[in-house]
Image (spheres, grey):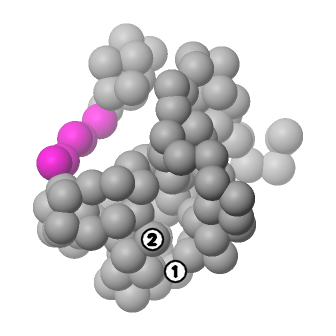
Amino acid sequence: MAKRMACWGLETDVVSSGPRGLRQLAIAHYDVIFSDMMMPEMDGLEFARLAREAAGALLPPLILITSARLSGEKEHALAAGYQQVLFKPVRQRELLRTLHWVFNPGTN
């Protein structure tokens, strides 16, 4: 995904774990955060909770990426603070639609 977004002229940062993502969030500004559900050291739901505690109202939109299509997982993600859920493999059209939603709120 990062390579795709770079081809579209977007800057991305990629980290290897939830705690590293939280550290990046503390030192950099982001327009959107994509998070995997299954990460080393914490899952995506815990990441969302800790990110919201740390950033509060300044937290940009959170988008969860998951391979699991378990019953209720999307609802759990939305309740945890994610604005959207994308299922792997993420198709280019879905990614573009999500980015359009982030950068053009109110036009969807």
Query: Residue 9's spot in the image, x, y percent?
Result: 39, 19
- Magenta span: predominant SS is loop
Q: Which residue is mark 1?
A: 57
Query: Residue 32's spot in the image, x, y percent?
Result: 47, 50
Q: Which residue is mark 2?
A: 45
Residue type beneath disc 2:
Leu
Q: Considering the image in quadrants, where does the N terminus appear?
A: top left
Which range is magenta?
12-16
User: Disc 1 to disc 2, how far (Cα)?
Assistant: 18 Å
Left or right, 50 with respect to 103, comes to left
The structure residue drawn at horizontal position 57% and vertical position 72%, both measured from the top left corner, is 81
Q: In the rendered image of this protein, does residue 96 appear above or below residue 75?
A: above
Question: Which element type, helix, strand or loop, lies under badge 1?
Answer: helix
Q: In the rendered image of this protein, does residue 24 appear above or below residue 10?
A: below
The number of numbered badges drawn on the structure is: 2
Which disc, if any, is residue 102? none
In the image, 99 versus 87, the foreground residue is 87
In the image, 44 versus 28, the foreground residue is 44
In the image, 45 versus 104, the foreground residue is 45
